[in-house]
Image: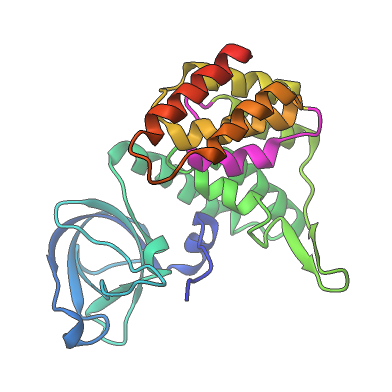
Amino acid sequence: SPIKPRPLRLLVTEAPYIVYADVIDVTHYGWKAGPDKDEAVLLVKEVLQGRLSTDTLIVSFNSNLICPWPPSYKEGAKVLAFLRESKNEEVYKTCALSYGVKEIEEKGYRVYKERIEEMQGILKIKNKRKKEQATVDWLITCTNHISTRWEGVFDLGRSSDFMFYLDRRSMTIKPRIELSREQSKRLRTSCFSIDNLAYEDRKFIELIRQKEDKELLVFLIQDLKTSPIEDLPKKEFVMKLIVELTKREDLKATVSKIRKLDLMDKERAAKLIEIIKQFITQL
């Protein structure tokens, strides 16, 4: 079964070792060899957490897992890996399976390194309230860059138990931490700075959306008009949001045409593009 997602905040807390490394070799022994028999050899470029006596590490893993998703190591890749020692002291394992290794180039790594070092400082804060607020500010900072955006959006949302909790009496999700006015403003600014929304950004939109949100509406219309027409899943979710915000029946009628498209139709993409173009002309 799936494991609970591990955002960066938890990985820094839980992983004894954090390294940025080149994957110089990967060996797959096959499912008959047993679990965790695959091996990746990492040449460590930088250690961000823990102390290592060597710059070459062997990481054992099971590439045959399907659910939960296994860690992925590809020869020649650069990875940010969150590791722990196995019972065999010469071999390491990946914390939190697929969440514990991120294939990432130098530019994205530099952003991650800054956030990791900041979180290491936050973890040293003794005062619970100050630590909590520093973490919220840090999560908002994570949303500023595409590399770490998910790390912040996930932990600020209802799927995480950091900002919200389950009230078992009413069986409803309730806020455990409230964003300040300044924090809410920073979060919205971060969202509106995205040049081209991705389908995955729908969770970010949910975070910042207000009841009568004209600013968000302007942002969505601009994105719909200027982003590549071929990005169909994103276009569709943006159109539906615009309908919700405008409550316009003509736009709703245009979007409803999408449901009538046959998923097996070879011309579905072309027909969907025509619907998108019609929607845009109605705005």
How many labels sit on residues? Answer: 0
In the image, what residue occupies the spot 61% across and 26% down? 254
Magenta residues span 194-212
Q: Residue 189, how many percent across, how many down?
A: 64, 27
In which quadrant will I find the C terminus?
top right
Q: Nearer the viewer, residue 22 or 192?
A: 192
Is 128 placed above or below 137 here? below
- Asked if residue 39 lies in the magenta stretch, the reply is no
Q: Residue 99, how many percent across, how many down?
A: 42, 61
The residue lying furthest to the right in this view is 169
Left or right for 259, reference 36 = right
Q: Residue 232, how many percent across, how many down?
A: 44, 33
Left or right for 126, reference 1 = right
Q: Nearer the viewer, residue 248 or 149?
A: 248
Res. 50 in view: no
- Asked if residue 203 lies in the magenta stretch, the reply is yes
**Residue 222 is drawn in which quadrant?**
top right
In the image, what residue occupies the spot 75% across and 21% down? 214
Q: Nearer the viewer, residue 144 or 262?
A: 262
Q: How is the image coloured?
A: rainbow
Left or right for 90, reference 165 = left
In the image, what residue occupies the spot 74% across and 23% down? 248
Is 148 placed above or below 270 here? below
Q: Nearer the viewer, residue 189 or 133?
A: 189
Res. 206 in view: yes
Q: Residue 44, how many percent across, how many down?
A: 22, 57
